[in-house]
Amino acid sequence: MDITLTDYPAGAAVATDLVNTSPTVTEAGDGLPTPGSLAEFLAEHDVRLDAFADREPTGEDLFQVQLLRREVRGILETETEDQAVAGAHVLTRRAALGPVLRQDVDGRWQWHVPTAPGAPPADELAAFVGVGLLGVVRALGHDRFRACGAAGCRGVFADTSRAGRRRYCRPDRCGNRVNVANHRARVGGAVR
């Protein structure tokens, strides 16, 4: 896998969505219940792991990614910037090699972080997520790691939005629930 440093929002988005597949967050149980669901998750996020170039995910791959999910959550819940950076470094060291400079299709030099040949899938994914989280801390700050603002939700996320005002782990779900509840409260209060 070749991770481009300028694409840290993609790694942060995968970190957020991975953590929020946990059965402690989703209402419907584990969001990654099968090796096939792991393949779908990676495809939805356009993540191409070298380990899956010639094979499908296995039950062991899924188990290792589910363990990674816990590690990532721990990083998103850190209290300090130093703790977040240390945790993300642990993730990147699982498979990442030193950064290299390569030219992109337009001839511009870009930093890339390749992963070690033969690295296990969870380690490749850890490196991708780790680079993304390091990018968030560097470019946006540790305060962009947040807990979901929806009552009763245990989700966490890395806010990579320009304005930095994201409040929900899953805006389409948690945000909509809050908006609907607020609307009902306003309409119900006006009817009395």
Image (cartoon, rainbow, N blue to C red):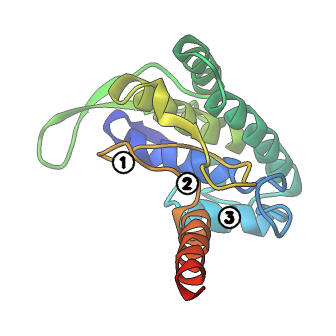
Label placed on residue 39:
3
Residue sitting at 41 percent across and 25 percent down? 141
Amino acid on which the number 3 mark rests in the picture: Ala
Relative placement, left or right, of 63 versus 48 is: right
Residue 168 locus on image (x, y percent): 55, 54
Residue placed under numbered mark 1 in the picture: 161
Relative placement, left or right, of 61 versus 75 is: right
Q: Nearer the viewer, mark 3 or mark 2?
A: 2
Q: Quadrant of residue 111?
A: top left
Determine the CA span between mark 3 and mark 2: 25 Å
Q: Tag 1 or tag 3, which sits nearer the N-term? A: 3
- Are the residues tagged 3 and 2 within 8 Å (C-beta)? no
Query: Could you classify mark 1 by the number of other residues whose Cα lies within 10 Å: few (under 14), some (14-19), or many (20 or more)?
Result: few
Query: Could you classify mark 3 by the number of other residues whose Cα lies within 10 Å: few (under 14), some (14-19), or many (20 or more)?
Result: some
Amino acid on which the number 2 mark rests in the picture: Tyr
The reply to whether residue 120 is visible in this rendering is no
Residue sitting at 61 percent across and 63 percent down? 174
Residue 87 locus on image (x, y percent): 64, 20
187, above or below 57, in the image? below
Determine the CA span between mark 3 and mark 1: 27 Å
SS class, disc 2: loop
Relative placement, left or right, of 75 versus 128 is: right
Residue placed under numbered mark 2 in the picture: 168
Residue sitting at 86 percent across and 64 percent down? 29
- Are the residues tagged 1 and 2 within 8 Å (C-beta)? no
